[in-house]
Amino acid sequence: MPPLPRSIAHLDMDAFFASVELLRYPHLRGQPVVVGGRRALATTAGQAFPCLHDYVGRGVITTATYEARALGVHSGMGLMKAGQLAPDALLLPADFEAYRHYSRLFKATVREIAPHLEDRGIDEIYLDLTALNPDGTPDGARRIARQLQHAVLEATGLSCSVGVAPNKLLAKLCSDLDKPAGITVVTAADLPARIWPLPARRINGIGPKAAARLETLGIASIGELAAADPAWLQEHFGERYGIWLHRAAHGDDERPVVTESEPKSVSRETTFERDLHPRTDKADLSEHFTRLCEQLAADLARKGYLGKTIGLKLRFDNFHTVTRDQTLATPTGDAATIRRAAGECARRVPLDRRIRLLGVRVSGLVRPGDVPPHATHTPTQAELFA
Ligand code: TTP
Ligand code: MG
Ligand code: MG
């Protein structure tokens, strides 16, 4: 029997920074409000908040309320340009401390209900709801999504939107389809009717450049991308990104939801029964070394990781400990490759004493297929606001 489809959710807060500001200034609800610029502006006489038309400078909008978006302003737009579209919109300075506070609060609230949580930045998370929705029904998914929205609203006063789908790629796309305060659930069967009509740029990993390129090639919708010949896509976008585009359009994404308790590294070490001398016990040492690397490779495979940095640890008979590491060009899970890299590390250590302990570590862990190859890297909000 094929495995049951997963139930993966993406939860994203609605107009996050602006919504946090409205908690402070509830009387501004319903008005066009934008957040941007750190400096306090001079306010027009009698007004508590400056309007966009008063703004002079090079600041940009971090976000806007939905009322302001209706006037055509959006994240990333220059404040002066926004001032032409929405001159009466109120401009509030950003308060990152407050946003971080509410970010922690909503995540802690969600975690109580759905502990299998991946933090994706200041206002969004992925959740693996499979265990909470064992039958995988859309109704079950919708019920949990409503429960999450309700709990977040109770705890923070803020609204969020949730997408639930068989994987992260589709869940992320769905959380954005019915904002604000929306719930969108799709199954694989919904793909042609609900996903394929959408513009290709809705896929997270198809940035403005790739979208423009697709457009010049006559591909506007996700459906058109799905219908394109994968070999032809590879010709135009390179081997790896081409195939990634093809798979993405078919709603194909195996990436797991990675919780925070994920390891930073995987390692194995062994203390010898008797201290081994690098010269006289060379064969013995080499055998231990190889076995350790094989065990480590098996650990990595079991946990589903590859790693880029290979580290070696040696403790001598006088308990002096040294470590060396080497970073490879590409992540590996291969025992022989790990052994070779760790062996090269050993060559950088003066080996003139007996060895008591030998350890090998792999860090810089990635999940195979975790990032769309060659896709332009869009910084996550976590990176922007770290
Ligand atoms: P988003 O989730 O992209 O946007 P949002 O929460 O404001 O609105 P939506 O309802 O569409 O989700 O980003 C979260 C926060 O990150 C946003 O409130 C402000 C900040 N941000 C920036 O500072 N600059 C940007 O360009 C973007 C996109 C977001
Ligand atoms: Mg958001
Ligand atoms: Mg977001």
Image (cartoon, rainbow, N blue to C red):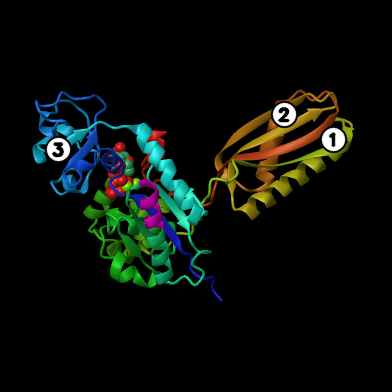
User: Relative to residue 245, is residue 29 drawn left or right?
Assistant: left
Please identify, in this view, whether the residue under mark 2 or under mark 3 is nearer the observer. 3
Sequence-wise, which precedes: disc 1 or disc 2? 1
Secondary element at tag 3: helix
Q: Which residue is mark 3?
A: 82
State how far apart marks 2 and 3 are (Cα): 61 Å
Q: Amino acid type of disc 1?
A: Lys
Instruction: Report if residue 125 lies within the magenta region.
Output: no
Mark 1 crowdedness (10 Å alpha carbons): few <14, some 14-19, many ≥20: few
**The image quarter in which residue 365 lies:** top right
**Residue 295: image x %, image y %?**
73, 49
Q: Which residue is mark 2?
A: 347
Q: Residue at x 45, y 50 (%)?
A: 109
Q: How many marks?
A: 3
**Residue 202: image x %, image y %?**
29, 55
Sequence-wise, which precedes: disc 2 or disc 3? 3
Q: Which residue is mark 1?
A: 282
Q: Residue at x 28, y 57 (%)?
A: 200
Q: Amino acid type of disc 3?
A: Ala
**Residue 15: image x %, image y %?**
28, 46
Residues drawn in magenta: 148-156
